[in-house]
Image: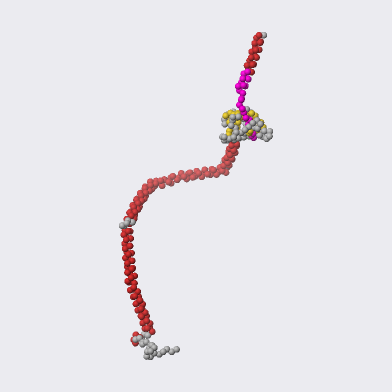
């Protein structure tokens, strides 16, 4: 009986120790963090996301997923309810995406913010605030993958059309023409060999031409220098141009003196001579007129003039 009582006491002690250990573990592992409820409403697929999944803010663990349910007020919409640490800076510009841990495929909620310094987003059990869910990396990869597949399909269709029998004939014909062009180009170097052989002589001639051009340039430079010297000499204060100007001034003065002498002395004599010549010409004209009217006057002389009034033989004119 004594052995049985000792065994019973040992069993009770062991059970009490286990219960105490569990209670101590629960006590030390209890979560005293104050959390704020938030909600995510989305129509996107959320593969790999389960309740009790981690919620991280820019990589730091700040909460967990409480439950995932369907929205009864809107068909097809999923509600994800979160508990987030009150100290987490959830603002009005905070958004959520789905992240995945390594190769396990276990999803978690990744919170991020568009900008720093936005106003905090208030939330409570009575009025739960909603955080928008944006497409994650896999969603974007899926959408872009579909676009890439569509483009690849179009490219494959284009390639298939390109290698159609009709196009194959065209391509083969083009290759044939390219081969013929290559054969023709192969003969070009042989045709250029005589020209290449004459290139040294042409180079020598070019060198001689350059030397001639250099000599001509030197001659032109010398002529330019001579022209500059000639211009300098002509434009000197006592140069030929200055002396010529002095001579021209002197000749001009002499001409002016001669002109003055002609105006004062010679012109009056010329004028009187012209008047005498006019008188003589009038007398000659009268003589010529008289000879024309009475040629006999050369032999008998000029007739006597008619007697005037008071002279013997005057006859008054009759009306």
Q: Is residue 105 magenta?
A: no
User: Can the viewer see residue 45?
Assistant: no
154 vs 274: above or below: above
Which quadrant of the view contains residue 147?
top right
Q: Residue furthest top?
A: 1
Q: Is residue 181 above or below residue 106?
A: below
x and y percentages locating residue 306 in the rendered image: 38, 88
Q: Residue at x 50, y 43 (%)?
A: 179
Classify residue 188 as left or right of residue 133.
left
| View extreme (front): residue | 310
Residue projecting furthest to the right:
72
Q: Is residue 174 visible?
A: yes
Query: Along the line of sight, which residue is nearer the eye, 172 or 284?
Result: 284
The colour scheme is secondary structure
Residue 199 or 100: which is nearer the viewer?
100
Where does the image place residue 108, in percent across and percent down from the top left?
60, 30
Read off the magenta span. 20-43
Tell me where residue 308 appears, x and y as whole percent.
38, 88
Give the residue displayed 33% in from the left and 68% down from the top: 260
- The residue that appears at 32% across and 61% down in the rendered structure is 246
The quarter of the displayed image where residue 319 is located = bottom left
Residue 30 is covered by the magenta coloring: yes
- Identify the image quadrant of the N terminus: top right
Residue at 66%, 9% (x, y): give it.
2
């Amino acid at each position: 009986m004594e052995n049985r009582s000792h065994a019973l006491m040992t069993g009770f002690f062991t059970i009490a120790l286990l219960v105490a250990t569990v209670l101590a573990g629960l006590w030390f592992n209890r979560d005293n963090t104050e959390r704020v409820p938030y909600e995510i409403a989305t129509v996107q697929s959320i593969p790999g996301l389960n309740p009790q999944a981690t919620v991280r803010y820019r990589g730091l663990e700040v909460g967990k997923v409480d439950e995932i349910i369907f929205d009864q007020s809107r068909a097809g919409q999923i509600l994800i309810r979160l508990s987030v640490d009150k100290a987490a800076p959830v603002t009005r510009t905070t958004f959520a995406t789905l992240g995945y841990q390594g190769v396990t495929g276990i999803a978690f909620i990744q919170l991020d913010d568009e900008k720093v310094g936005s106003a905090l987003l208030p939330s409570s059990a009575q009025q739960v605030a909603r955080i928008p869910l944006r497409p994650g990396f896999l969603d974007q990869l899926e959408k872009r993958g579909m676009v890439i597949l569509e483009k690849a399909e179009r490219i494959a269709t284009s390639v298939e059309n390109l290698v159609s029998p009709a196009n194959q004939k065209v391509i083969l014909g083009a290759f044939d023409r390219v081969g013929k062009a290559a054969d023709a180009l192969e003969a070009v170097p042989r045709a250029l060999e005589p020209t290449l052989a004459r290139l040294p002589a042409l180079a020598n001639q070019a060198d001689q031409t350059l030397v001639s051009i250099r000599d001509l340039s030197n001659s032109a430079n010398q002529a330019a220098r001579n022209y500059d010297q000639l211009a300098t000499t002509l434009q000197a204060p006592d140069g030929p141009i200055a002396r010529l100007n002095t001579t021209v001034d002197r000749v001009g003065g002499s001409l002016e003196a001669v002109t003055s002498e002609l105006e004062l002395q010679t012109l009056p004599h010329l004028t009187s001579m012209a008047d005498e010549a006019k008188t003589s010409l009038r007398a000659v004209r009268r003589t010529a007129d008289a000879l024309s009217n009475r040629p006999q006057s050369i032999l008998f002389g000029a007739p006597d003039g008619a007697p005037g009034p008071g002279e013997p033989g005057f006859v008054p004119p009759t009306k």
